[in-house]
Amino acid sequence: MVETWWEASMQVFARTADRRLHHRVLLDLPTSRAVYPPRLHDLLNHTLASARTHPDRPIRDWATAVGRDEA
């Protein structure tokens, strides 16, 4: 199930400091908040908060793209 992959990807992002792994797991996630099921919203919010302050621009850009749904 794709939602399980999204959940695992966000958990890996939260638990590792490896920037290459961050790119690998996060940048393949959808940039539309609407596609994430409600059960993943808290994890998504945590991921977004971390991604917004990430030292790598592509990660911050991903967070910005997801954040466009918030407006």
Image (cartoon, rainbow, N blue to C red):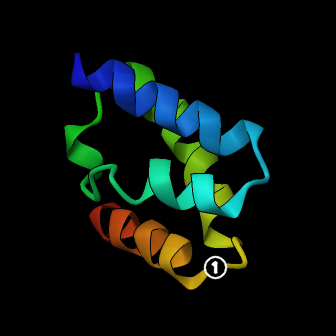
Displayed quadrant of residue 43: top right
Q: Tell me what residue is drawn at x 45 percent, y 27 percent.
A: 7
Judge left or right: residue 43 versus residue 27.
right
Displayed quadrant of residue 18: bottom right
Judge left or right: residue 66 versus residue 34.
right
35 up-or-down from 3: above or below: below
Tell me where residue 26 appears, x and y as whole percent: 46, 53
Judge left or right: residue 22 versus residue 38.
right
36 up-or-down from 53: above or below: above
Q: Out of 41 and 71, give the one closest to the viewer.
A: 41
Tell me where residue 23 appears, x and y as whole percent: 52, 61
14 up-or-down from 60: above or below: above
Tell me where residue 12 appears, x and y as whole percent: 62, 35
Q: Tell me what residue is drawn at x 68 percent, y 63 percent.
A: 19
Q: Out of 55 and 50, give the one closest to the viewer.
A: 55
Q: Secondary structure at mark 1?
A: loop
41 up-or-down from 24: above or below: above
Q: Tell me what residue is drawn at x 49 percent, y 78 percent.
A: 58
Extreme residue toward the front, this view: 20
Extreme residue toward the bottom, this view: 57
Q: Out of 51 and 28, give the one closest to the viewer.
A: 28
Displayed quadrant of residue 68: bottom left
Judge left or right: residue 46 versus residue 38.
right
Q: Amino acid at mark 1?
A: Asp
Tell me where residue 65 appears, x and y as whole percent: 34, 72
Q: How many marks?
A: 1
Task: Identify the residue position indicated by label 1 in the image.
Answer: 56
